[in-house]
Image (cartoon, rainbow, N blue to C red):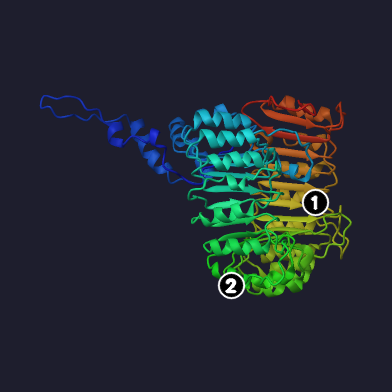
């Protein structure tokens, strides 16, 4: 179980902390009729001091460490925790979590592992929110915030949140599914104090319900409304009225069914926006003859607080000059849905001197990345996604773009880079030019691709990353890699917490190096690699300290997985087969292992065998 307390809140009114005077002093009658105060026990004094100190402790690791000092610290830390983070909903039961943390106002809960995003897990595997929703209603009637990621959420769950938490203010659903527009309609209608509704990369069922018009008609408290993932038409007139009566609205991300013409009307009603997702950056509606097109340039110019821009779906490049007035202030720009060229990008990026976060498609080619490197000296995070994700496609970005970024953006801390060809020299250059890298994810899409100049494995490049980037905590490796690369990771990746491996390695020794050499490892994801039972057994000392291990299409057998289950009874070992297979082979398709305080779950579908 992992918990997080990133921000502190005042406790609920009905469990307000008792003052030190009232708690520590006993008033008794005396001969003079004045109260006498008797000193508190030393442990009580300590706990009072701790309560005041722990309010200022915000780091998740520091809080967890404080709770392990002694029983007194354990109790007080639980009483002062108002934001609870659980990285695996099966690691602990709702009852156990709520018995310990009694004053929670915000819950962050994760369900399926990340590889579920790549269709590597059967859809109905689990991660249902319903048991948590029902338990929350009994334990935390003052709950204000729920953030869910990769969870299955039903319309009934949304109704529970809306109806039973009268002060509910914030719902964030990331990569979730199971609910529809009818559930959203109930939720937004009942939550009259709602400040945040963020639907991010979630699958929302189109029930043909006009959910936007269900927001209450009185003045809105909305500060953030994100629904760019909702793949259905919306009532634009209702949205326009909602935006007009939401003076606190700062973040608005629209779906593809909102045109640039409609965007104009929203922007002139909400010039206070700081984050904007444009929806479709084209004119979906057919203008009447003689209609004058709006002045988009002035609409953007009026949004003087805008620092984050995204959207640009169905983009018509002719409209791109409209965003020129805000480029100088942008700290975040997301073109990951816009198939634009380097020539279309250059006049925009040349104005973005403050840019810190940039996402883009590889359609900008190496030339576009060179333009980014020439201007964006403050860049901290870069993501380059493929237009064509097929393994045999001819990717337009290469080591040339990567090296340009490393030379021009020396403050880079995080990079995700999809490409078809790469060289060790470019990766080594990045390790030297960007030593502050915390996240390095290089995805060479073609399987077992070597250095395309020398023909050598990519071992030395990834070895340089773990040797020279001393702050590295997340690493994704790909390309032609031998056990030598994993040896580098085991020797030098002492802070690596998340490792993703695809189509790499040549024997069990590779995984053995990692499991024996990376003491901070929390999440290990491996697909289509040759590691088998011997490699799996080498991690027996490590698995109780990890959040999970995922292996798919490797060389595991059921017998080998069974050995791990017998040796580590507090570890949940799930063997997953394809949903259309009735019986399990000896060869294991998917292994998912995770630590749990509760033991095996009770909602496993038939295609999951818990050893």
Q: CA distance from mark 2 to mark 1?
A: 57 Å
User: Picture coordinates of residue 148 (x, y %)?
Assistant: 62, 41
Whether residue 541 is visible: no
Say whether marks 2 and 1 touch (CB < 8 Å).
no
Q: Earlier in the sequence, mark 2 or mark 1?
A: 2
Disc 2 versus disc 1: nearer the observer: 2
- The residue identified by callout 2 is 298
User: Picture coordinates of residue 287 (x, y %)?
Assistant: 71, 66
Q: Is residue 111 left or right of residue 448?
A: left
Q: How many marks?
A: 2
Is the residue 528 above or below the residue 562 in the image?
Answer: below
Instruction: List the single residue furthest toward the front.
Output: 289
Whether residue 246 is visible: yes
Q: Residue 433, located in which quarter of the rendered image?
A: bottom right
Is the residue 58 above or below the residue 436 in the image?
Answer: above
User: Picture coordinates of residue 502 (x, y %)?
Assistant: 80, 48
Q: Residues within 10 Å of mark 1 (few under 14, many from 20)?
A: many
Residue 475 vs residue 13, the one in the foreground? 13
Instruction: List the single residue furthest toward the left.
Output: 32
Is the residue 141 above or below the residue 347 in the image?
Answer: above
Q: Residue 391, located in which quarter of the rendered image?
A: bottom right
Q: Is residue 407 left or right of residue 225?
A: right
- The residue identified by callout 1 is 484
User: Picture coordinates of residue 508 (x, y %)?
Assistant: 82, 41
**Does dot 1 land on a helix, a strand or a loop?**
helix
Residue in the image at 72% along x and 49% along y: 231
Q: Residues within 10 Å of mark 2 (few under 14, many from 20)?
A: some
**Does dot 2 land on a helix, a strand or a loop?**
helix
């Amino acid at each position: 179980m992992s918990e997080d307390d990133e921000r502190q809140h005042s406790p609920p009114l009905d469990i307000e902390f008792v003052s030190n005077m009232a708690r520590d002093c006993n008033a008794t009658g005396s001969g003079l009729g004045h109260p006498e105060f008797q000193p508190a026990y030393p442990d009580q004094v300590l706990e009072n001091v701790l309560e005041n100190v722990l309010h200022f402790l915000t780091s998740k690791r520091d809080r967890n460490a404080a709770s392990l000092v002694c029983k007194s610290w354990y109790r007080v830390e639980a009483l002062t925790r108002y934001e609870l983070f659980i990285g695996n909903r099966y690691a602990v039961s709702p009852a156990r979590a709520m018995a310990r943390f009694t004053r929670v106002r915000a819950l962050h809960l994760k369900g399926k592992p990340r590889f579920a995003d790549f269709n590597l897990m059967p859809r109905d595997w689990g991660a249902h929110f319903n048991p948590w929703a029902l338990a929350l209603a009994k334990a935390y009637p003052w709950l204000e915030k729920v953030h869910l990621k990769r969870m299955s959420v039903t319309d009934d769950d949304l109704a529970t949140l809306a109806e039973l938490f009268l002060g509910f203010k914030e719902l964030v659903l990331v990569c979730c599914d199971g609910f529809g527009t009818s559930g959203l309609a109930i939720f937004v209608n009942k939550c009259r104090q709602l400040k945040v509704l963020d639907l991010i990369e979630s699958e929302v069922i189109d029930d043909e319900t006009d959910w936007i018009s269900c927001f209450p008609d009185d003045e809105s408290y909305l500060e953030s409304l994100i629904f760019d993932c909702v793949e259905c038409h919306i009532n634009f007139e209702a949205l326009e009225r909602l935006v007009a009566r939401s003076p606190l609205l700062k973040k608005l991300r629209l779906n593809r069914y909102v045109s640039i013409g409609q965007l104009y009307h929203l922007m002139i009603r909400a010039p206070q926006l700081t984050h904007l997702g444009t929806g479709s950056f084209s004119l979906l509606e057919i203008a009447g003859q003689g209609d004058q097109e709006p002045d988009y340039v002035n609409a953007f110019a009026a949004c003087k607080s805008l620092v984050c821009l995204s959207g640009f779906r169905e983009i018509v490049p002719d409209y791109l000059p409209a965003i020129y007035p805000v480029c100088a202030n942008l700290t975040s720009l997301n073109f990951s849905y816009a198939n634009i060229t380097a020539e279309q990008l250059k006049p925009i990026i040349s104005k973005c001197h403050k840019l810190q976060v940039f996402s883009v498609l590889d359609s900008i080619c190496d030339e576009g990345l060179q333009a980014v490197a020439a201007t964006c000296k403050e860049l901290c995070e870069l993501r380059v996604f493929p237009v064509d994700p097929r393994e045999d496609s001819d990717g337009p970005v290469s080591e040339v773009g990567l090296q340009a970024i490393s030379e021009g953006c020396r403050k880079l801390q995080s990079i995700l880079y999809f490409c078809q060809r790469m060289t060790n020299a470019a990766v080594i250059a990045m390790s030297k030019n960007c030593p502050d890298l915390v996240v390095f994810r290089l995805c060479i899409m073609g399987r077992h691709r070597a250095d395309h100049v020398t023909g050598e494995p990519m071992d030395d490049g990834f070895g340089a990353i773990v040797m020279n980037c001393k702050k590295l905590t997340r690493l994704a490796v790909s390309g032609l890699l031998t056990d030598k690369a994993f040896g580098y990771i085991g020797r030098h990746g002492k802070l690596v917490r998340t490792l993703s491996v695809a189509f790499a390695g040549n024997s069990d020794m590779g995984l053995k190096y990692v499991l024996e050499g990376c003491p901070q490892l929390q999440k290990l994801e491996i697909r289509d690699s040759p590691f088998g039972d011997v490699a799996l057994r080498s991690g027996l000392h490590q698995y109780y300290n990890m959040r999970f291990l995922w292996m798919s299409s490797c060389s595991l057998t059921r017998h080998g997985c069974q050995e791990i289950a017998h040796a580590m009874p507090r570890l949940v070992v799930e063997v997953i087969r394809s949903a259309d297979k009735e019986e399990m082979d000896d060869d294991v398709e998917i292994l998912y292992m995770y630590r749990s305080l509760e033991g095996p779950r009770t909602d496993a579908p038939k295609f999951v065998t818990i050893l």
